[in-house]
Amino acid sequence: MASVLQKSAPSYKMVKKWARLFQQGRESCEDDPRPGRPVTVVTEENVRKIEKLVLADRRIKLWQTAEELQISKERVGEIIHEHMNMTKISARWVPKMLTPFDKQRRLQTSKDFLELVGDNLTKFATEL
């Protein structure tokens, strides 16, 4: 196992513990429930609420969303990044993955811009 997994291989002590647990009748490889507070903030309902707020105003800030929903900024950020698969670009929340339509539209806009500027690209850049 160590030759295949290398640095991520479990220790001999851990493998020995697993063997003992399975010999005692354990049938699952899943972790047992841990004590402590259960996850209550990252719910489907909160994901829907945050999605509605972000889509209504893509410039909304994490703290504004957190304040409105009475949850932490960290959990709002987790929901937006992990569950909605969005990132912040130029102060706007945008999807991480562009659709084929979006890609085609960007390509066409770039071609139109280059056609508009034509051979005067250097002149245009200096005037910017």
Image: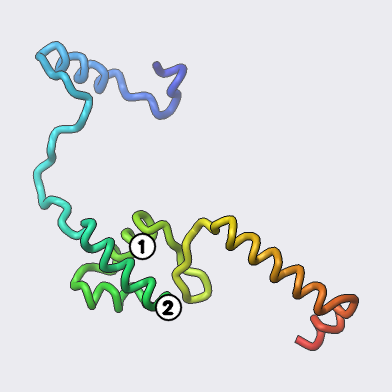
- C-alpha span from label 2 to label 1: 13 Å
- Side of 12 relative to 59 (left or right): left
Q: Amino acid at mark 2?
A: Arg
Looking at the picture, how far across and down is residue 112, in whole percent? 75, 73
Q: Nearer the viewer, residue 80 or 113?
A: 113
Labels 2 and 1 touching (C-beta < 8 A): no
The numbered disc on residue 125 is none
The numbered disc on residue 59 is 2
Looking at the picture, how far across and down is residue 43, in whole percent? 21, 57
Q: How many other residues sit within 10 Å of disc 1, few (<14), some (14-19) or many (≥20)?
A: many
Q: Residue at x 31, y 23 (%)?
A: 11
Q: Residue at x 14, y 33 (%)?
A: 32
Q: Residue at x 64, y 66 (%)?
A: 105
Q: Residue at x 14, y 11 (%)?
A: 23
Is residue 126 positioned above or below 95 on the image? below
- Side of 91 relative to 22 (left or right): right
* Mark 1: secondary structure: helix
On the rendered image, what quadrant is the N terminus found in?
Answer: top left
Looking at the picture, how far across and down is residue 88, in whole percent? 46, 68
- Residue 100 sits in quarter: bottom right
The furthest residue to the right: 119
Q: Nearer the viewer, residue 114 or 88?
A: 114
- Residue 41 sits in quarter: bottom left
The numbered disc on residue 80 is 1
